[in-house]
Image (tube, rainbow, N blue to C red):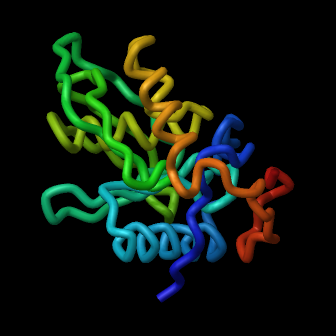
Amino acid sequence: MAVQPIRIFGDPVLRATAKPVTTFDKELRRLVKDLTDTMLEAPGAGLAAPQLGISLRVFTYNVDGVVGHLVNPDLALTDEEQDGPEGCLSLPGLTFDTKRAYGVVAKGFNMYGDPVTVEGTQLLSRCIQHETDHLDGIVFIDRLDREQRKAALKAIREADWGNGPAPTVKISPHSTFGTAR
């Protein structure tokens, strides 16, 4: 098992746009394994590479007993919306109702470079949108209305991890193809 530390809100890597994966090799497969192991240990419904400090477009998910991953996702969203609770492993202990599309069709690749399509509604749709946001430097509280965002920022300031020292940046065990921050 290769459980890695999860980056906490405030770490600059969480605000950077991740680079597309161009090499589907052993290092990428190791990253997917580390993401999966860390997500399952946390436990969480999803985990994106930037949350481990790796600025690459890859995430894992665990929804309704289905564990998977997606590399270089491209999303098509339904017009129908859902509103429900959402949290994030990079904002431990915080949950806020967040609007998302009800359904998604996500196209991308698996860790071997084979094309993959993942379709889902409700929680799977929410998870895929949430993790893809991480790849674009967006944290779910960015999607809250003004009042909720204000409450979220207050909760972050009051959290025991919210006023901690700046995160220590560690060298990644994974090849970052020159994109680590």
**Is 98 left or right of 15, judged from the image as shown?**
left
> Please, is residue 21 above or below residue 15 in the view?
below
Tell me the residue at 33%/68% (across/down): 43
Q: Quadrant of residue 30?
A: bottom right
Percent x, y for residue 34? 52, 74
| Residue situated in front as seen by the camera: 28 or 143 | 143
> Please, is residue 88 above or below residue 61 in the view?
above
Tell me the residue at 54%/72% (across/down): 29
Tell me the residue at 33%/61% (across/down): 44
Tell me the residue at 59%/54% (across/down): 8
- List the single residue furthest toward the front: 158
> Please, is residue 105 above or below residue 90 in the view?
above
> Please, is residue 157 above or below residue 82 in the view?
below
Q: Quadrant of residue 10?
A: top right
Percent x, y for residue 103? 20, 27
**Is 75 left or right of 167, judged from the image as shown?**
left
Percent x, y for residue 165? 75, 57
**Is 71 left or right of 25, judged from the image as shown?**
left
| Residue situated in front as seen by the camera: 107 or 84 | 84
| Residue situated in front as seen by the camera: 111 or 47 | 47
